Image: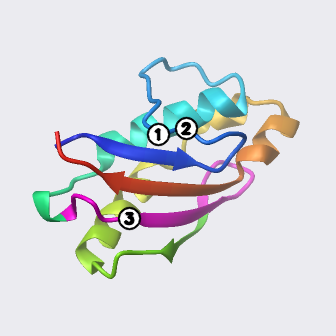
Amino acid sequence: MKNVIFAFGVVINLLGCVSNNDECISALDCAEQLSYRIQNNLHLNKNHIGKKAVVKISLDDRANIEQVTIVENSADEQFERAVIDAVTMTFPYEALLELPESEYKKIKTIKLTVIPQSD
């Protein structure tokens, strides 16, 4: 089960728009890469289908996580833990540091929505 909807609140919302193109030359490109990386790190089971977690991620100036907070959840601690674990395994992501400072500032605070769906 790898069908997961990701919505990034960075520049625009991305719904399931992930690629494994490793270029990170704009905030949008980086959001796509982060979606792909988080999805690959996310370990879910069939009980998580239809659940929703909204996570706020704050990064420091070196692309390390400063804070990860669940801001909306489905009252499922196992699902929330899986989402937080996937996020923490994704960072630091050094490719973000290649962005111009103005673009990096757009992605330092990320609002991520995760909604697993069945195949």
Q: Is 19 left, or right, of 85 in this rendering?
A: right
Q: Is 70 left, or right, of 104 in this rendering?
A: left
Name the residue tied to disc 2: 14
Residue type at mark 3: give it: Lys
| Residue drawn at x 42%, y 66% as measured from the top left | 53
Q: Pinpoint residue 76: horizontal percent, then vertical percent.
A: 28, 78
| Residue drawn at x 75%, y 30% as measured from the top left | 99
Residue type at mark 1: give it: Ser
Q: Pinpoint residue 52: horizontal percent, then vertical percent.
A: 38, 64
Q: CA distance from mark 2 to mark 1?
A: 9 Å
Q: CA distance from mark 3 to mark 2?
A: 16 Å
Point out the tag, 1 or 3, that comes first from the N-terminus: 1
Name the residue tied to disc 1: 35
| Residue drawn at x 81%, y 47% as measured from the top left | 105
Decide: marks 1, 3 in contact (CB < 8 A)? no
Q: Pinpoint residue 116: horizontal percent, then vertical percent.
A: 29, 52
